[in-house]
Image (cartoon, rainbow, N blue to C red):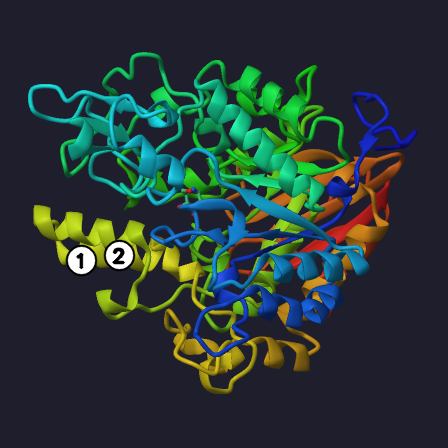
């Protein structure tokens, strides 16, 4: 840990800030099956990533979150693991992973392993044993219940619907799966399970992993007795058990134990994917007396566009809500820390969700979103393709989709007679495959991703939106992202500055100040296609542009003018 005497100035003087490498660098998320294929099988692999290391180095990122590459039947694209200590043949070998680690480390880029321990694959040897009989030594590694009145033990729906329970013939019981039926939930109450997982985590740390992105880590504990969930009933008649699976005690003690037995004394980074997490819980995860996890991904700004029945039911939103959700975490996280993101492998493309896909504004809007992301308080995670301004895919047929979640949703819609239009709107807006199509490296066949048949189609716009054309254009999103990443290396105000939201009710302007050690910045982004002019607060002196998405900067006469979807960062004195 690095220490600094920097203090945040402003209304409240804060303790000296604890500096860490993972607060100061920008992370890049690689979705391995779609980044780069090296052997023509149409499927991205570790060798492909190794071949693209120069790209990552030039972009300037300091760390990689690599999606799961372990042995897996790939029912949920690798989030269903059948051997935690080996690599799926499609991705390569353990030796490839080690080579990737070494090559990244040569360039001072860290490598995070995706830790998926809420569940395993049904092909994991533990589950193969566990399901054989009630007295099998591995039986208690998973969560089992007898049926009730010939039906599932409770009314829980799974993330991938319909029920969270699956009947197991040999034992005459049901097992719990919060995700697909091929992803049985582990029983974290069993000390043997905990020891197995801790030993596996140490195995990766000893192999040089620089930490973990922790899949649904706040779901490990479930309410004792597994009572029925209350809440809206879905189209299949089940209820999503948010209150019985998210942040359920003793989750904090469990994570303290995990840290103590594995990464607790190491200079590595852990970031937890935490769905349905109120701010108070995020604070506890990241700043309790004992180390639990270092940072959390909050989903409040993501869930904003969903109705209580879930992500497929779109809820329109306005900018003040987005600002309010982000600002709450910015100011409330205290000594804890957050991972910042607009998108990931489960979410629509940032431009399609938060910005515009109108080709007249796509480039500046992507730069504007990047400007906000890199200047918020926390650690930015760029999802592959964001740096070239990728957008959602105009799917035309269900055969083009591959993800278990969306395919189950399509089945549910068709089985329950839901309107086709509702189904298609949901696919275009929210299907996870929108962010999973291959990285388009150039405008050649299959975008230079593979010489074979890609496992999923490319976005048909790849001839225009691809890395080579972005690199050839000095005004591209790519070059602007490089500037943002570089800027973050030299300006501690970006990660550490104290955040203050301005004009919270404005429906087009997202503006906030950052303050650190006598330095002051204003970050302003226009979330509309109309020009905005802001009169700067009268106390701002000696204003200067730090970075701008505009060719002609908008600063002058105590005013800042932002064109459609543009952003500018200015420094000022008080
Ligand atoms: C969250 C992951 O990000 C998602 O891709 C996966 O399907 C579920 N967890 C289950 O592991």
Q: Is residue 427 left or right of residue 423?
A: right
Q: Is residue 557 visible?
A: no
522 above or below 105? above
Residue in the image at 59% along x and 32% along y: 199
Give coordinates of residue 446: x percent, y percent. Answer: 45, 81
Q: Which mark is residue 36?
A: none
Give coordinates of residue 474: x percent, y percent. Answer: 71, 77
119 above or below 156? below
Pointer 1 local density, CA inside 10 Å: few below 14, some 14–19, many at least 20: few
Q: Is residue 136 left or right of residue 91?
A: left
27 above or below 450? above
- The quadrant of the rendered image in which ligand 1 is seen is top left
Residue in the image at 37% along x and 50% along y: 76
Pointer 2 local density, CA inside 10 Å: few below 14, some 14–19, many at least 20: some
* Front-lying residue, 558 or 323: 323
Task: State which quarter of the image contains the C terminus.
Answer: top right
- Mark 1 — residue? 421
Instruction: Determine which quarter of the picture holds residue 392.
Output: bottom left
Query: Answer yes or no: do the residues labelled 1 and 2 have beta carbons within 8 Å?
Result: yes
Residue in the image at 31% along x and 61% along y: 402
Secondary structure at numbered mark 1: helix
Secondary structure at numbered mark 2: helix
Q: Is residue 309 left or right of residue 488?
A: left
* Front-lying residue, 345 or 193: 193
Instruction: Determine which quarter of the picture holds residue 154.
Output: top left
Q: CA distance from mark 1 to mark 2?
A: 6 Å
Q: Is residue 30 visible?
A: yes
Give coordinates of residue 210: x percent, y percent. Answer: 70, 44
Task: State which quarter of the image contains the N terminus.
Answer: top right
- Mark 2 — residue? 425
Give coordinates of residue 394: x percent, y percent. Answer: 33, 69
Q: Is residue 496 left or right of residue 45?
A: right
């Amino acid at each position: 840990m690095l220490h600094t005497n920097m203090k945040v100035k402003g209304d409240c003087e804060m303790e000296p800030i604890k500096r860490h490498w993972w607060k100061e660098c920008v992370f890049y998320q690689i979705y391995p099956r779609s980044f780069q294929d090296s052997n023509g099988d149409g499927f991205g692999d570790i060798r492909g990533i190794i071949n693209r290391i120069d790209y990552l180095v030039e972009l300037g990122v300091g760390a990689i979150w690599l999606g799961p590459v372990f042995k897996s039947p790939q029912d949920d694209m690798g989030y269903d693991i059948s051997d935690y200590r080996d690599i799926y043949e499609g991705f390569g070998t353990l030796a490839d992973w080690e080579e990737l680690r070494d090559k990244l480390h040569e360039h001072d880029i860290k490598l995070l392993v995706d830790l998926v321990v809420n569940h395993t694959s049904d092909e994991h040897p533990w589950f193969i044993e566990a399901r054989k009989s009630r007295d099998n030594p591995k039986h208690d590694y998973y969560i089992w219940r007898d049926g009730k009145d010939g039906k599932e033990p409770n009314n829980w729906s799974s993330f991938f619907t319909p029920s969270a329970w699956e009947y197991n013939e040999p034992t005459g019981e049901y097992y719990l799966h919060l995700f697909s039926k091929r992803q049985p939930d582990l029983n974290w109450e069993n000390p043997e399970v905990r020891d197995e997982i801790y030993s596996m985590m140490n195995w990766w740390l000893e192999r040089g992993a620089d930490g973990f992105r922790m899949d649904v880590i706040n779901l490990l504990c479930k309410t004792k007795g597994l009572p029925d969930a209350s809440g809206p009933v879905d189209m299949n008649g089940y209820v999503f058990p948010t209150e019985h699976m998210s942040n359920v005690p003793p989750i904090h003690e469990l994570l303290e134990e995990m840290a103590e037995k594995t990464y607790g004394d190491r200079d590595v980074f852990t970031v937890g994917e935490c769905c349905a997490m109120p701010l108070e819980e995020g604070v506890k995860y990241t700043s309790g007396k004992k180390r639990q996890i270092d940072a959390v991904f909050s989903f409040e700004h993501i869930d904003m566009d969903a109705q209580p029945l879930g992500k497929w039911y779109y809820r329109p939103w306005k900018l003040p809500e987005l600002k309010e959700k982000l600002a709450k975490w910015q100011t409330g996280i205290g000594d804890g820390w957050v991972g910042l993101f607009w998108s990931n492998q489960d979410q629509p493309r940032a431009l399609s969700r938060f910005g515009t896909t109108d080709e007249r504004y796509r480039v500046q809007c992507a730069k504007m979103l990047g400007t906000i992301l890199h200047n918020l308080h926390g650690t930015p995670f760029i999802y592959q393709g964001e740096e070239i301004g990728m957008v959602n895919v105009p799917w035309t047929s269900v055969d083009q989709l591959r993800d278990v979640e969306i395919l189950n949703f399509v089945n549910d819609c068709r089985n329950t007679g839901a309107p086709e239009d509702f189904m298609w709107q949901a696919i275009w807006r929210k299907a996870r495959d929108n962010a999973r199509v291959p990285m388009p490296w150039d405008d050649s066949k299959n975008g230079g991703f593979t010489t074979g048949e890609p496992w999923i189609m490319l976005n048909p716009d790849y001839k225009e939106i691809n890395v080579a054309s972005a690199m050839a254009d000095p005004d591209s999103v790519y070059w602007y992202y490089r500037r943002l990443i570089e800027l973050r290396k030299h300006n501690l105000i970006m990660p550490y500055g104290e955040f203050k939201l301005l004009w919270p009710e404005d429906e087009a302007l997202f503006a906030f100040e950052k303050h650190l050690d006598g330095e002051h910045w204003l970050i302003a982004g226009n979330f509309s296609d109309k020009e905005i002019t802001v009169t700067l607060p009268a106390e701002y002196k000696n204003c200067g542009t730090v970075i701008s998405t505009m060719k002609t900067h908008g600063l002058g006469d105590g005013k800042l003018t932002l064109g459609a979807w543009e952003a500018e960062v200015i420094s000022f004195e008080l």
